[in-house]
């Protein structure tokens, strides 16, 4: 018989191409949670938190680590580079945080190993030199690690507990990747011993943190604790539902919170979609509302500079453009969003007018939702509605009625176009810069 669960769970997902400000929102919501779970991606994700003016960038460890007493789980849907994980732990410990007693890693997580990184980088270089065009990966081995998972040959965290088993699987896997590196990618082969020896060293540090994440999350609920599922990247980068092939290698959508952590979908009680007040994208791929960012005095340059739009992990300048409500309709559909949190509203302060893409013209027809085919998206001509901007500041405001009238009108029109209610508005990077209209843990 299934035990009754009294805890409430919230899933946080990005609704655009990532970089929506999920880390700050997760940190804010963690005040009401007993545990935070990462359920997909790897250290290609970056969440920047600003707490009392101090900035902290996290890549693999859940954002809940910044809250004392909160358990943090890395679910089976995440690919783990053990060397990076330990480096991140040590960096947080140096800042005075207690990490190892609160961080738990699913034994089923696939490992990212040095040959995954080499294959990732060599493949991007080959695509660029051949004229095929780079996908725009972070070069951290994420994709190749997921490929091994799907091919049922991955080394997993649990293998670190069994040196002989690990060595046998490593020899076979390394042989395959070296064949590809030398024969196809024209790169150098990697040696077995350094990889094996280093893996055994990190294994000793990781063993105390290995756990059955699904069971622990279930037990938290049974005991009345709330859980927060923290998504990485964004819906439009999802391997199935994004702008393929310019996507990441995992499922970034809310439904994967269940599969990627080991709980049932009935445990996902509220889905919060994080949405920038405009649109950005890092890397290659179609972007219908993109604006040029290099010319001072233009809207694109304003969004890029005022928004400080650079990737947390890569440092690459993000591409910027107007809000795309037609793309967001696709995200609402895929994720089953309960509500939205709008971030970076203050970046729009001072603009004379603001545009919202409400649909596209494609092949002489008007459509109101993002197409599934990336080639079609490239040919989409955005259809805009123009709204008046505002001169007052929205930065740091914590009450809806304190917002400028035109800012409220923009948010209300955005809500109507997207088709989901706005429950929160972030008005700055600090955790306190938040307008709450409906609380996800009390809705």
Image: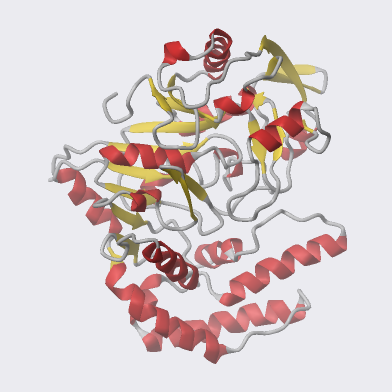
Q: Residue at x 62, y 80 (%)?
A: 176
Q: Residue at x 53, y 84 (%)?
A: 195
Residue nearest the viewer, comparing 80 with 307 = 307
Q: Where is residue 354 shown, x and y percent of the image?
A: 68, 17
Q: Is 180 placed above or below 11 here? A: below
The reply to whether residue 154 is in sight is no
Q: Where is residue 345 shown, x and y percent of the image?
A: 56, 25
User: Does residue 297 appear to the left or right of 194 in the view shown?
Assistant: right
The reply to whether residue 258 is in sight is yes
Q: Where is residue 44 shown, x and y percent of the image?
A: 56, 56
Q: Quadrant of the N terminus?
A: top left
Coloring applied to the structure: secondary structure
Q: Where is residue 193 shown, x and y percent of the image?
A: 53, 91
Q: Residue at x 63, y 78 (%)?
A: 177
Residue nearest the viewer, comparing 126 with 311 = 311
Q: In which quarter of the image is residue 29?
A: top left
User: Does residue 350 appear to the left or right of 51 in the view shown?
Assistant: right
Q: How many labels does the image show?
A: 0
Q: Is 285 placed above or below 350 here? A: below
Q: Which residue is drawn at 38% across and 79% down?
A: 203
User: Does residue 97 appear to the left or right of 316 in the view shown?
Assistant: left
Q: In which quarter of the image is the C terminus?
A: top left
Q: Which residue reaches farthest front?
A: 53
């Amino acid at each position: 018989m299934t035990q009754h669960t009294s805890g409430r769970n919230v899933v946080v997902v990005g609704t655009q191409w990532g970089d929506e400000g999920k880390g700050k929102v997760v940190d804010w919501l963690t005040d009401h949670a007993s545990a935070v779970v990462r359920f997909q991606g790897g250290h290609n994700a970056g969440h920047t938190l600003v707490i009392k003016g101090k900035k902290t960038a996290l890549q693999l460890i859940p954002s809940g680590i910044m809250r004392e007493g909160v358990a943090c789980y890395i679910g089976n849907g995440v690919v783990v580079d053990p060397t990076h994980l330990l480096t991140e732990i040590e960096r947080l410990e140096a800042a005075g945080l207690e990490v190892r007693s609160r961080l738990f890693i699913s034994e089923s997580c696939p490992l990212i190993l040095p040959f995954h990184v080499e294959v990732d980088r060599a493949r991007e270089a080959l695509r660029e030199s051949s004229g095929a065009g780079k996908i725009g990966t972070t070069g951290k081995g994420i994709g190749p690690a997921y490929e091994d998972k799907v091919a049922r040959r991955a080394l997993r965290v649990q293998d670190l507990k069994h040196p002989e088993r690990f060595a046998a699987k490593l020899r076979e896997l390394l042989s395959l990747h070296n064949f590809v590196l030398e024969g196809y990618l024209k790169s150098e082969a990697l040696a077995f011993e350094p990889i094996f020896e280093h893996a055994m060293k990190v294994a000793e540090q990781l063993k105390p943190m290995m756990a059955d994440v699904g069971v622990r999350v279930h037990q938290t609920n049974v005991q009345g604790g709330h859980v927060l599922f923290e998504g990485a990247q964004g819906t439009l980068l999802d391997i199935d539902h994004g702008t393929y092939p310019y996507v990441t290698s995992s499922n970034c959508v809310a439904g994967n919170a269940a599969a990627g952590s080991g709980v049932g979908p009935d445990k996902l009680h509220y889905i919060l979609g994080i949405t920038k007040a405009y649109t950005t994208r890092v890397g290659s791929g179609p972007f219908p509302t993109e604006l040029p960012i290099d010319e001072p005095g233009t809207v694109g340059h304003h969004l890029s500079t005022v928004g400080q739009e650079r990737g947390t992990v890569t440092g690459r300048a993000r591409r910027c453009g107007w809000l795309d409500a037609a793309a967001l309709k696709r995200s609402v559909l895929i994720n089953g969003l309960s509500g939205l949190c709008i971030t970076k509203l203050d970046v729009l302060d001072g603009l004379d007018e603001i545009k919202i893409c409400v649909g596209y013209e494609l092949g002489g027809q008007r459509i109101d939702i993002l197409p599934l085919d990336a080639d079609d998206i490239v040919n989409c001509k955005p259809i805009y509605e123009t709204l008046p901007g505002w001169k007052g500041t929205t930065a740091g405001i914590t009450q809806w009625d304190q917002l400028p009238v035109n800012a409220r009108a923009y948010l209300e029109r955005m809500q109507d176009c997207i088709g989901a209610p706005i429950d929160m508005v972030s008005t700055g990077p600090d955790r306190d810069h938040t307008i709450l209209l409906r609380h996800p843990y009390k809705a």
